[in-house]
Image (cartoon, grey):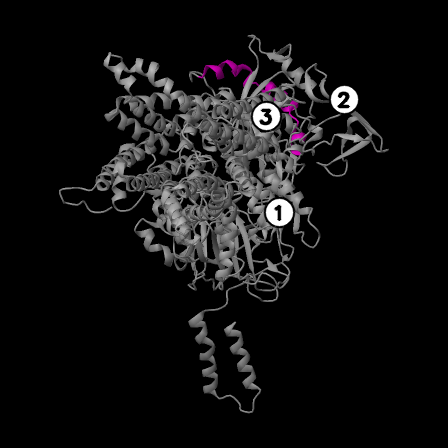
């Protein structure tokens, strides 16, 4: 396959993946905040095709009821069946990807402690994680573009200042800047905004590597004939940046975006593991995963790990895009992975 | 022991053919006296009331965090305090399972008629773990250091009675007299956990003003001496501490065997609850005192031959509660908060919220049923002081709506609005590291949504949270947990008194802001000097009734204390009071031949 | 650092080392000051939790603030920190009542041990597979290995840790993170407990780095295979073993060395999160604890160590490139 075709394929795979995620999140069986307190910690609901008498039927779920003797376990009663409709209409008129007939319940990947549907939360949580990744990537790329091209164009002491400055930023412990940030925000700050600001702060520290890369490209293009010519005609740095440098950088920026996006999505996960993730009840892959470590060990509810599969798949797809976007021929198997801050 | 053997030898000789001459008797007398002078006597043992066990073996316990110091004067964190219980002993000890005071290094004590003076007599023949004798001088030294203002020991304030400190003096060879500045009902409990320090090890450092730099975690094991059941053998930073049996311990069992039974105790550090549980289940550690409900049910699901001893001790002394900012914020510039003041600081609002919260749901969902619903700040786990007098009205969303309406807060569509027309909404801050509190907040959020109140949640890092609540007062509502170290109501004074620093909802008041706070102040001050146990209890029941009427904080639930121990361990004496298991380590023993060092 | 040579022609690498060291010293100085200064912004201080304990009076609290020097102006504290640095001290840890240096060194050792183990695991897995894949580019197995490496690259460390914990639970494998107590006093028992503690974090880290070693090694080996002197050596009838170790390996090792230099720079910072999540007693958990308990000297000390290692690693990587690429040397 030719390189452009491969690139197109990879990028559209990424677009389709997130479009699917968003679409399914919109048509999720339940709201991400709805608590089915009577079905807390329920295992995944089985979709059945054969009723107890052995007759094949349209897909259905059995009626679910809490087991009276042991709390936290549930009993299926297949004498009472509820049909399941693909793209059916829920009670509130919403179109739902898999809709059980009332009053049946369908938890594809079980529920959490508060009885919230993990499938629905994973989809919505994916959007939160993806959005934080996008915000951080944009902030970091913008800064990297400014810093890198200035350093590359001007050279000399601005270059030294920017290069050492980024080194300094990278070494600063992000953790306590985050604590300071949250304290500076009023308590009434909406949780999602507070978290977005935290992620933006991380990206303020994380633009060093792309900046260094862009600086290299700018430096090499500075010596090119057409840039020299434009300079000879008296073009200023802003003009040069806009007209001649930016077009050259577009490819690098695209590749860097593909590298940074999964990295910043992992930052969201890491922050959640440190207890600095997005606030309840808003889901995110990080917060959903950070809370299950104990449960995996204590009671084997492996379905709680569903967001991990989605997360891994997202990063796999982003990795493909990153490889397809690389300008230089990179060894297959991937570029060295940078550590998350 | 040596002494007793010698006397038996003499008896044997008397049965022989030769009759003893005067010289032999003199020799014998010398022989019996010699060891007394050289090695001293056996101590005046405390005889354990537990069943007789068998000596030997090694026990592994995991600590949640690494201890910060070996010096009891510096111990602020839970791990350091737990270690302290192994290495050191106190004069009078609170027996954790019964929550009552018992004799420890002090063999007996008496109280003067006016309740101001206590005389404590030390056991005879006590020795530190390095073999040096413990005398009255060590006790006086300990209190001198502890009370020395220049030392700034954090534990000093525990001894403060009505703002002043007790004074100590030696009485005769083996007793100390403690003079209290004022009558203090729970005085005996003051002595618990005050480790008696070896003067011979620490005096030089104290004189040079450097005592707090002694006994850091890097200190050599030979530097440290105590009267606890174990002594330090080895410390590997970040990994483990090894303790060996203290051969000079002052307890024995009823068969005359000196305690502790265990040869060695290893403390490993597992900051992760899941690693702690995995280790315990794999038999790599033998006690687990911080089990969650899920861990408990997972262990109880093991096959019988592998199942450890498991116990649900019922509600502990930890309680989670929700409270609203009641500070006088005039002139603070926090306009968003000031606008909400009219309803945020109204008792009817608190009652309505309290009525709407599904406490039983919290206990069932967050703690899998292993928690008890609270009606006041006293947990049912506090056997001595829980009055049961205060009861909670049943959950009723209807009644909550009625109360809100009476306040002038009405529903407009789905949204509750105040008389000025702005929606009623507030933010609950909680400790981000506490997943249980995050879940509680999510439940409360849903419950209040049913009333038309929008609740936002703000998980904050713990110190940031405390800073907001106690210093900047920039918060609307918060969930906190309190864990009482002791059951006595006096421990609650800083929270209950209106001028207390821990009076969370409105700390450090110059004058009680409300009539009921003044009433609580009066009741609490009265109980402290009252020697009559029954009157104190009535007093405190009244306090509990006021709290559940005025709801300065909404007590939510108290999680159960769930413990597990290896099935071959015996004399395991779990307690609701912390530390839940290791306080009885000196009497614990292995029933089977395993776990030899 | 080698002593400055007084000869007239200073070799290129010496001047690089000198100028970079100077820049690094300035950066580290700024970093330490920023770390101190920014700490002031965090709400609460070391005594906030003590202040929330009912047992401590305001007077005692004031005394403690004085004892810990919490109200000393920033400039003075920084100056005394710099002064202590000249004596090899990093300032007192507030919670551990001892100098941060003594606290950090054993943790540094544990972190280095973990990273080296992870590196070893990654190399042992990646290099043979890479050589095989380069030698047999058409084989089906090589294709699967390549795909497996891509998947491993996409698998986040934390997800892998979760998966390992789940496996440990399901099959009773004794592999919780962190250091356990040895079952007996012998060196064998000690080694066993060390290995079970190392397993989870080392595997999680190695899974993230192995793919990049694999990718680079495979590319370098294929390139070396195409070199004319290698082809000549082959055609001359030299035994494959000799060709492999005398010709191919040195040629392919060069890019690996520069990659290794880069990853050695992260030896004190790459594993912090995994350490924290698995409970390995390295720098990570201590740093987190120190930030949460506002133990400023421990935090600054840890940051300085990690940053110095990072800069030294970058410098080492640059020097290797300098040595290998004659064009830059002038």
Say the numbered circle drawn on residue B551: 3
Both on one chain, marks 1 and 3? yes
Q: Which residue corresponds to mark 2?
A: A101
From which residue to which does the magenta span run?
B334-363
Q: For the view shown, which residue lies furthest in the right direction?
A: A53
Q: Gap between marks 2 and 3, in whole Å?
A: 44 Å
Foreground: disc 2 or disc 3: 2
**Secondary structure state at the residue bearing disc 3:** loop
Residue B523 belongs to magenta span:
no
Q: Gap between marks 1 and 3, in whole Å?
A: 32 Å
User: Counting other residues with Cα less than 10 Å from the Cα at mark 2, is it few (<14), some (14-19), or many (20 or more)?
Assistant: some
**Residue C213 location in percent, x, y?**
44, 42
**Secondary structure state at the residue bearing disc 1:** strand
Q: Quadrant of the C terminus of chain B?
A: bottom right
**Residue B355 location in percent, x, y?**
65, 23
Q: How many marks?
A: 3
Q: On the rendered structure, is C139 left or right of A40?
A: left
Q: Residue at x 65, y 33 (%)?
A: B363
Q: Which residue corresponds to mark 1?
A: B563
Q: Is residue A261 above or below residue C201?
A: above
User: Quick check: can you spot residue B345?
Assistant: no
Q: On the rendered structure, is C40 left or right of B269?
A: left
Both on one chain, marks 2 and 3? no
Q: Quadrant of residue B234?
A: bottom left
**Residue B170 location in percent, x, y?**
42, 55
């Amino acid at each position: 396959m030719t390189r452009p075709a491969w690139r197109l394929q990879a990028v559209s795979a990424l677009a389709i993946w997130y479009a699917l995620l968003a679409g399914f999140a919109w048509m999720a069986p339940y709201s991400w905040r709805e608590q089915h307190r009577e079905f807390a910690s329920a295992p995944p609901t089985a979709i059945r095709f054969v009723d107890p008498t052995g007759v094949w039927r349209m897909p259905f779920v059995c009626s679910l009821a809490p087991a009276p003797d042991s709390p936290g376990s549930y009993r299926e009663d297949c004498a009472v069946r509820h049909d399941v409709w693909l793209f059916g209409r829920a009670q509130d008129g919403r179109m739902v990807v898999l809709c059980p007939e009332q009053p049946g319940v369908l938890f594809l990947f079980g529920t959490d402690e508060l009885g919230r549907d993990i499938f629905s939360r994973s989809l919505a949580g994916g959007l939160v994680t993806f959005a934080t990744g996008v915000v951080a990537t944009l902030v970091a790329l913008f800064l990297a573009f400014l810093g890198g091209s200035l350093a590359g164009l001007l050279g000399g002491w601005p270059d030294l200042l920017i290069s050492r400055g980024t080194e300094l930023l990278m070494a600063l412990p992000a953790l306590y800047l985050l604590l300071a940030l949250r304290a500076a925000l009023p308590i009434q700050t909406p949780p999602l905004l507070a978290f977005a600001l935290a992620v933006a702060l991380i990206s303020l520290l994380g633009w060093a590597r792309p900046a260094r890369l862009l600086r290299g490209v700018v430096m090499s293009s500075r010596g090119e004939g057409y840039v020299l010519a434009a300079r000879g005609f008296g073009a200023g740095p802003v003009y040069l940046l806009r007209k001649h440098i930016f077009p050259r950088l577009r490819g690098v920026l695209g590749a860097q975006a593909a590298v940074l996006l999964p990295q910043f999505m992992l930052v969201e996960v890491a922050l959640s593991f440190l207890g600095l993730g997005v606030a309840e009840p808003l889901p995110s892959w990080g917060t959903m995963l950070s809370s299950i470590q104990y449960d995996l060990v204590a009671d084997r509810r492996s379905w709680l790990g569903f967001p991990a599969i989605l997360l891994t798949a997202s990063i796999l797809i982003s990795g493909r895009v990153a490889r397809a976007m690389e300008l230089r021929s990179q060894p297959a198997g991937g570029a060295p992975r940078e550590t998350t801050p | 022991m040596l002494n007793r053997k010698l006397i038996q030898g003499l008896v044997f000789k008397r049965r022989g053919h030769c009759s003893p001459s005067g010289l032999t008797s003199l020799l014998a007398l010398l022989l019996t006296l010699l060891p007394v002078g050289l090695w001293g006597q056996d101590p005046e043992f405390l005889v354990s009331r537990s069943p007789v066990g068998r000596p030997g073996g090694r026990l592994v316990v995991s600590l949640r965090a690494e201890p910060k110091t070996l010096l009891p004067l510096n111990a602020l964190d839970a791990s350091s305090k737990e270690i302290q219980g192994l290495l050191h002993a106190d004069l009078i000890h609170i027996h954790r399972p019964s929550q009552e005071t018992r004799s420890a290094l002090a063999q007996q004590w008496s109280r003067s008629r006016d309740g101001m003076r206590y005389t404590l007599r030390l056991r005879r023949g006590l020795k530190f773990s390095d073999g040096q004798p413990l005398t009255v001088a060590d006790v006086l030294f300990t209190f001198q250091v502890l009370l020395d203002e220049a030392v700034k020991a954090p534990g000093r304030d525990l001894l403060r009675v009505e703002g002043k400190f007790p004074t100590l003096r030696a009485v005769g060879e083996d007793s100390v007299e403690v003079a209290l500045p004022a009558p203090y009902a729970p005085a005996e409990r003051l002595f618990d956990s005050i480790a008696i320090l070896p003067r011979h090890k620490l005096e030089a450092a104290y004189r040079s003003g450097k005592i707090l730099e002694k006994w850091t975690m890097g200190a050599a094991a030979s530097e440290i001496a105590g009267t606890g059941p174990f002594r330090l053998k080895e410390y590997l930073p970040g990994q483990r501490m090894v303790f060996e049996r203290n051969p000079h311990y002052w307890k024995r069992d009823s068969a005359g065997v000196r305690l502790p039974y265990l040869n060695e105790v290893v403390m490993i550090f597992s900051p992760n609850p899941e690693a702690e549980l995995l280790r315990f289940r794999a038999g790599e550690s033998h006690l687990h005192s911080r089990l969650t409900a899920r861990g408990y049910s997972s262990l109880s699901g093991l096959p019988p031959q592998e199942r450890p001893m498991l116990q649900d001790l019922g509600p502990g002394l930890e309680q989670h509660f929700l409270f609203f900012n009641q500070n006088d914020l005039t002139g603070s510039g926090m306009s968003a908060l000031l606008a909400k003041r009219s309803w945020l600081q109204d008792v009817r609002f608190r009652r309505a919220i309290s009525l709407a919260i599904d406490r039983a749901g919290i206990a069932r969902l967050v703690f899998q049923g292993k928690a008890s619903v609270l009606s006041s700040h006293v947990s049912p786990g506090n056997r001595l002081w829980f009055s049961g007098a205060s009861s909670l009205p049943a959950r009723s969303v209807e009644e909550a709506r009625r109360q809100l309406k009476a306040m002038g807060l009405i529903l407009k569509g789905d949204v509750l609005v105040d008389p000025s027309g702005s929606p009623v909404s507030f933010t609950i801050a909680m400790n981000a590291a506490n997943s249980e509190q995050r879940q509680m907040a999510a439940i409360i959020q849903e419950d209040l949504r049913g009333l038309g109140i929008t609740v936002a949640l703000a998980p904050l890092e713990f110190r940031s949270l405390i800073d907001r609540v106690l210093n900047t007062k920039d918060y609307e509502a918060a969930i906190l947990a309190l864990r009482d170290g002791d059951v006595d109501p006096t421990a609650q004074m800083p929270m209950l008194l209106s001028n207390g620093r821990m009076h969370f909802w409105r700390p450090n008041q110059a004058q009680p802001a409300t009539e009921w706070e003044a009433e609580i102040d009066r009741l609490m001050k009265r109980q402290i000097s009252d020697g009559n146990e029954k009157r104190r209890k009535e007093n405190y029941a009244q306090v509990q009734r006021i709290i559940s009427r005025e709801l300065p904080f909404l007590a939510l639930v108290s999680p159960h204390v769930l413990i597990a121990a290896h099935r071959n361990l015996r004399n395991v004496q779990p307690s609701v009071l912390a530390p839940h298991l290791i306080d009885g380590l000196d009497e614990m023993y292995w029933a089977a031949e395993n776990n030899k060092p | 650092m080698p002593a400055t040579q007084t000869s007239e022609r200073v070799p290129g690498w010496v001047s690089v080392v000198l100028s970079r060291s100077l820049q690094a010293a300035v950066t580290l100085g700024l970093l330490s000051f920023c770390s101190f200064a920014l700490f002031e912004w965090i709400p609460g201080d070391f005594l906030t939790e003590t202040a929330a304990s009912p047992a401590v009076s305001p007077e005692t609290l004031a005394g403690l603030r004085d004892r810990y020097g919490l109200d000393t102006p920033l400039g003075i504290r920084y100056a005394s920190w710099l002064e202590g640095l000249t004596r090899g001290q990093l300032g007192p840890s507030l919670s551990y009542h001892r100098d941060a240096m003594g606290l950090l060194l054993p943790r540094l050792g544990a972190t280095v041990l973990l990273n080296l183990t992870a590196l070893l695991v990654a190399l042992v897995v990646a290099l043979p597979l890479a050589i095989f894949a380069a030698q047999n580019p058409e084989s089906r197995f090589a294709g699967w290995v390549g795909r497996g490496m891509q998947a491993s690259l996409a698998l986040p460390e934390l997800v892998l840790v979760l998966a390992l914990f789940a496996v440990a639970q399901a099959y009773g494998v004794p592999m919780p993170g962190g250091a356990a107590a040895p079952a007996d006093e012998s060196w064998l028992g000690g080694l066993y407990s060390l290995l079970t503690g190392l397993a989870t974090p080392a595997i999680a880290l190695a899974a993230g780095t192995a793919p990049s070693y694999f990718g680079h090694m495979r590319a370098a080996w294929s390139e070396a295979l195409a070199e004319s002197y290698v082809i000549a050596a082959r055609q001359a009838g030299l035994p494959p073993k000799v060709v492999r170790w005398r010709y191919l390996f040195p040629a392919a090792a060069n890019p690996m060395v520069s990659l290794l230099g880069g990853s050695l720079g992260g030896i004190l910072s790459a594993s912090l999160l995994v350490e924290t999540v698995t409970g390995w007693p390295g720098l990570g958990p201590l740093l987190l604890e120190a930030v949460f308990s506002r133990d400023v000297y421990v935090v600054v000390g840890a940051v300085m160590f990690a940053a110095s290692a990072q800069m030294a690693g970058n410098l080492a990587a640059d020097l290797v490139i300098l040595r290998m690429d004659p064009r830059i040397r002038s």
